[in-house]
Image (cartoon, helix red, strand yellow):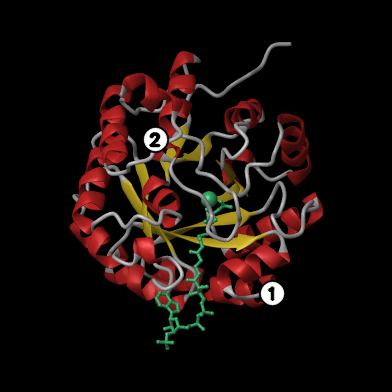
């Protein structure tokens, strides 16, 4: 069997948002800013820097506005942030992020636990956010969580995923990132879901938590299906606070190493990138999950 892979992919760094949101330890604004600046210096062109959600729900990111205002903006880098509603969008616009991401789940219970609303209640809010963001000149990215399984409902049918992805694209997001929120997908399932979803691959990205160590195997399937955008997290930091046991996204440096070994271009300088990983590691007393970080520390 010969696998066919793209020659170039984009890595979207979600560490400062997805990575930090689940950490009990509060990282000071200055340190977050220094870390994000190091990520910017590695050649990556997309960083999700924070989340404009309720600070009571996600205290780790309560300094979102300050972080966004204090980082150095490097030309060619998109600095994005998560927004759940109009209040979030207002804060995001005030902070002058380059684009915003909205998020919804394919399963009803996870959506309610995550944003306190049903899926049907959430969609009109996002309709309005997308319109307002576009008027302000900001593109909007969409996430769909629990695509491969839900921590509350178990199996999630591809039909339900398809419906939500279709809704987001129709409302006007430029790309939907398919979330394996609890890291439950296996490569065979990944192939089957991507085959059935049937959207242009240019509108899809993968956002895989590595809870069970299967993220890279699943990414390989995504690559072979023509997906060229992957979310990952520095050090493998992170998880979803509303998905018990969920660990971080696949570590960016592990993904980067695999892609580089395979001759797939990312424009990210590994040596520069690992400096950011080491800095991040120095902020935590626990060992981060990244394999590359263990080799390079
Ligand atoms: P709610 O309590 O239903 O909100 O929370 P509300 O509209 O009823 O408002 C209650 C109060 O919150 C009001 O203040 C609002 O002003 C305030 P009060 O009048 O009582 O003083 N408020 C806000 N404050 C700051 N920023 C805001 C905001 N909105 C309302 N944006 C809400 C609803 C959505 C806000 C809440 O549920 C929330 O913040 N949820 C965040 C959940 C979250 O961040 N989850 C993790 C990210 S998603 C994820 O990790 C998955 C992903 O990675 C993909 C994957 O892995 O699958 C994306
Ligand atoms: Mg996530």
**Residue ID for mark 2:** 287
Q: Quadrant of residue 15?
A: top left
**Distance between the Cα atoms at labels 2 and 1?**
40 Å
Residue 224 placement (x, y as % from top left): 65, 25
Left or right relative to 5: residue 149: right
Helix, strand or loop status at disc 1: helix
Q: Quadrant of residue 290?
A: top left
Q: Residues within 10 Å of mark 1 (few under 14, many from 20)?
A: few
Q: Residues within 10 Å of mark 2 (few under 14, many from 20)?
A: few
Q: Nearer the viewer, mark 2 or mark 1?
A: 2
User: Residue at left 80%, top 54%?
Assistant: 159
User: Residue at left 57%, top 38%?
Assistant: 210
Residue 174 placement (x, y as % from top left): 53, 53
Tell me the number on the disc at residue 120. Answer: 1
Q: Is residue 75 visible?
A: no
Helix, strand or loop status at disc 2: loop
Which residue extends farthest front? 285
Viewer-proximal residue among 136 and 145: 145
Left or right relative to 20: residue 109: right
User: Residue at left 43%, top 56%?
Assistant: 21
Residue 134 placement (x, y as % from top left): 43, 66
The quadrant in which the C terminus is found is top left
Viewer-proximal residue among 288 and 110: 288
Give the number of marks: 2
Q: Quadrant of residue 74?
A: top left
Relative to residue 225, is residue 166 depicted above or below? below
Viewer-proximal residue among 101 and 274: 274
């Amino acid at each position: 069997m010969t696998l066919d892979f793209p020659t170039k992919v984009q890595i979207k760094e979600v560490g400062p948002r997805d990575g930090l949101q689940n950490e009990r330890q509060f990282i000071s604004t200055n340190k977050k800013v220094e870390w994000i600046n190091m990520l910017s210096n590695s050649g990556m062109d997309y960083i999700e820097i924070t989340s404009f959600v309720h600070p009571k729900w996600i205290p780790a990111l309560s300094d979102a506005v300050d972080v966004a205002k204090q980082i150095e903006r490097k030309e060619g880098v998109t600095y994005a942030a998560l927004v759940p509603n109009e209040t979030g969008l207002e804060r995001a616009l005030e902070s002058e992020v380059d684009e915003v991401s909205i998020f919804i789940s394919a399963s009803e219970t996870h959506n309610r636990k995550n944003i306190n609303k049903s899926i049907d209640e959430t969609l009109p809010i996002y309709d309005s956010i997308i319109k307002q963001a576009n008027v302000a000149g900001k593109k909007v990215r969409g996430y769909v969580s629990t695509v491969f399984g839900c921590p509350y409902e178990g199996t999630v049918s591809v039909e339900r995923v398809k419906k939500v992805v279709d809704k987001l694209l129709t409302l006007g997001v430029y790309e939907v990132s398919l979330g394996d929120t609890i890291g439950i997908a296996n490569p065979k399932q990944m192939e089957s879901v991507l085959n059935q979803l049937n959207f242009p691959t240019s509108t899809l990205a993968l956002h895989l938590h590595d809870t069970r160590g299967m993220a890279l195997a699943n990414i390989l399937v995504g690559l072979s299906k023509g997906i060229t955008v992957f979310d990952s997290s520095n050090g493998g930091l992170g998880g979803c606070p509303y998905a018990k046991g969920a660990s971080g996204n696949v570590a960016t440096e592990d993904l980067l190493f695999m892609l580089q070994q395979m001759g797939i271009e990312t424009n990210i300088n590994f040596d520069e990138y690992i400096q950011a990983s080491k800095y991040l590691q120095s902020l935590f007393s626990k060992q981060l999950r990244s394999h590359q970080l263990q080799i390079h520390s």
